[in-house]
Every structure is written in C-alpha cells, then in structure tokens.
Amino acid sequence: MVHLIGALTLLPLGLLIVAADPIHVPLRRRSIHKLDLNEVARRVKVRYGFEDPAVSKGRRASTVSVPVTNQDGDASFFATMTVGTPPQTLGVILDTGSADLWFAGTSCLQDCQEVQLFESAKSSSFQGGNTNGVGSEVVIQYGSGAVRGALSQDTVSMGGFTVSNQKFLTVDAINGVILDSDPLGPSGLMGLAFAALAKTQATPFWEALVNSNQFSSPEMAFWLARSNNLQVQDVPGGAFTLGGTNSSLFTGDIEFINMPTGTPLFWTLTLSSVTINGKTVPISSDTTSAAIDTGTSLIAGPTADVTAIWATVPGSGPSPSGQGFFNFPCKTSVEVSISFGGKSWPISTTDIIAGQEPGESSLCIGAIFAVDVPANTANPSWIFGDTFLKNVYSVFRATPPSVGFAQLSSLAGGTGTGPASTSGSSAPIPTVFSTFNPSTFTGLPTISSPSSTGVANPGTSGTTSDNPVASGAIRVVQIPTTLSGALLTGLVFVLMLAL
C-alpha cells in the first residue's frame, strides 16, 4: 500500500465565462489492511524528501456527487473521475501532498494486478506517442515504490468539471506496493498540490479548473470522516468539494491562513504552537514549516520537537515497533491541540493513537512520529496528515494561496461546542503488525531548492530504465498512507505513514 509526499497565476479572462457552483463529492471508505509503521514512515520521508531514493471550459454535470472511497480504515481517501471519450470511470487517490495525475494503463503488467485499468485504445480523444509534447517517459518515485509511464493527454472530468486536454501519466509499470489488488479500488492518483511540484510538469487538474474560471471560488475543501469499523473495507467517509465549500459540513467562520511567500509547491503553513494536555511544548523556530497533506495518514515532525512532545506524556517512551515512533499507556488520555497562528485546533484522543503495540495490549503507539528533513532542502519540516485533518473542515484556496480550517458541524460529526472535538470516538484501536524504521522512510517529493523551472529536483528527467525505481536521479513524490495498513496510503496504500 502506498500511503505516507511558479507562483500560481489566475489567467485573465478574454471571454465571459460563467462560473459553476461548488461541487460536493461524497466520500466513502474501503476495507482495511494491516499497518506497517516502518513502511509508513519510510514513505513519508520519500514523499517529503527526508531521504533520497490546454484547458477547455467545463460543463456542470447533471449529477454533482461522485462516489469516493475512504480506504482501509482511514488509510486513504479516493474519488472517482472519468477519462477519455467515451468516458471511463476510474478511482484516484486525493493527495494534496503531490501534484501529478496518473492512471495504470492496459500495458501495466507489474504490480497492478486486479486493478481497473485505463484503456487508452478505447478513447477517441486520447493523445500519446510522440506528438503535441506527449509520449515522453516519466518516472515518479514514492516511498513505497515507483511508477513509470508515458506522458499522455485526454479529456478528464470530476463532478461535472472538465479539462479537455489534461496531461497525465499512463503508467505501464509499478514497482512496490502502490495500488491495492482490488478491482474496486483506485486505479491511480490525483495530486492536488501546485504545478511547480509536478514531475510531469503538467498543470494539475484543479489548477486548470481555476485558471479557466470554472470554479465559483478558487477553493477545494475536505471533510474526512473516520471509520468506526475496521473490519469493513468500504464505508461512507466524508466529502470532497470542488469550487467552494459545503456550508452544511462546518459551523462558524473558516479561518484562512496565508501560505509563506514565494513559489508554492506544497500547501504549507507555519506551525505556531503544539499543546499537550494543556501544556505548550516549545517548537524549534527553524523547523516550523508544515505541509497540510491529505495523502498522509499520520503527523511527522523533527526528532527534537517530537521527542519533546512525547516527554510531556507520563509513561511514554520509544516504540520498538518503529524508529521515531513513541508509545504510551492506552489508559492515558493524550489531548493535543495545534495552531498555525490563529485558533488552536484539538485532535481527537482516538486519532492520536496510531495503533496498539504488538504484544503489549496496555500500550498504544502515538500518531505523531519523528523524521528529520535533510539539510539544504526546501521541504517542510512537519507533515500534518489525516490524524489532524479528520478533526477539522479544511479548505485549500488558490488566491491568495492559503489553507483554512473550520469547526466540523454536527452533520459532519463535530460537537458544535468549539474549534474541534477532543473527545474520543467509538472507533476501535487498530493493531500494528510490523515495525517501522524512519531511517528508511521517504515521504514527499524531494526538493533540493526551488529551481528556476519550478520542478522539484527533477534529476535526470526523461531518462529510461528497465526498473521503474531505478534511482537516485529521480525526484521523489510520495504519497502517504494510513495506519491500519496504510498509513499514508496516499496511494493507496498504507501510508505507511500516509494516503
């Protein structure tokens, strides 16, 4: 399972284009897989570089709800979209921590068994080969593996919004556990970060819609609902809204926080405070950059800061299940609140539990783990995944680049009594089945520094290898997975951190 990672410009309108209303995409969840903490952390590192390893006006669809799945007990969230003419419906992981769109194609014979495939030969609008800037081979490496394919172009739609010449990767080889062997599961991944981060150098689907003024408001919003039954693979799990927000899912105002200035890559905010059981834990001033990532299941941060956080919890200590992880007595309530410069947002005590320590039923593994960003990189020091995002209504706004949070409404599982609920839920504690070694963890795409082209550490782009994971020179874009089998799943997969 895959799971744990220029300036945005709104093109001036030359024609009068009527913006569509926001599109609300319901989410649902799939079954669960065993969580591998080591793999989760490794993926986060790859995703965030902690270690090496033409748009047309869209039409409003008559039906705005697109079935989406919350996979494997909060491991990953994916929605369906269509590609080609006639349209083929395929599932894609929704990942704000990467920027590329790809689908497994019919030529994919490696690690894509039992996955619904994109049949490009059946699409009259498909463009491949070596024409119109498409056809070149691209490799994208994730923490749990890599995908290799040809740059392609076709009509892509979601929720009634359409981009007629969307560029994406038609994958012919997958190395590693990126997609689940499930015909009802995702067939690819849709990165929802910024174009400067895209390995394919293509404009992400969401940015194409913003640029063509198809949105009523240049926003995307998420309500990620947690699973209360780890034995059921597919359960309703929230909603993804394109072009605005869904007022029935939050209460009060949305608190928007502007992103740091400069060319946006990830959806990044500045972490201002972390409170544990009412006590503020000092955070190093040089490690406050934080990525807000729906494709990552857990929360990852610098070793010194994470160690300080767990030091405030009585009975806590390093977990033998994975380097960088900590455990604590399950009977101890760990109330965590996070602030990015405005309100303090509590995290459910249930979500702070990543799993139960194997062989130690009285000990739980914490969902905040340690991983350090390599020196001289532009990667964020912190990654806030679904452990945090399940507790707020989150909004990603293109202009100005900012991320907003609001209290969940009672309809969305909120209490209606504060910025967020800190009370535990009836969700069972997942069991962790294997160990994790953060030293081998790879998370978001590796960024040495923002380049003049906006492409993060492209390495030897355009090179070909018989092994899609062949190495070093390939920029890493990782997708987190989730805890019960795929921490960050980003793709699917177990996040293995997060998906």
Image (cartoon, grey):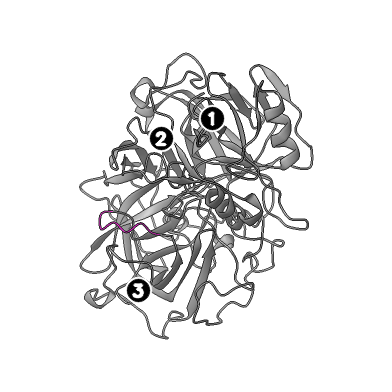
Seen in the image, is 175 located left or right of residue 153?
A: right
Q: CA distance from mark 2 to mark 1?
A: 26 Å
Q: Is residue 161 visible?
A: no
- Res 223 label: 2
Per the image, the residue denoted by label 1 is 364
User: Can you say whether 155 is above or below 4 in the image?
Assistant: below
Label located before the other in sequence (2 or 3):
3
Amino acid on which the number 1 mark rests in the picture:
Cys
x, y percentage for residue 73?
Answer: 38, 39
Q: Amino acid at mark 3?
A: Cys
Residue drawn where x is 73% and y is 57% of the image = 377
Magenta-colored stretch includes residue 413: no
Secondary structure under tag 3 reads loop
Residue at far top of view: 417
Report the residue marked by disc 3.
108
Read off the magenta span.
Answer: 179-184
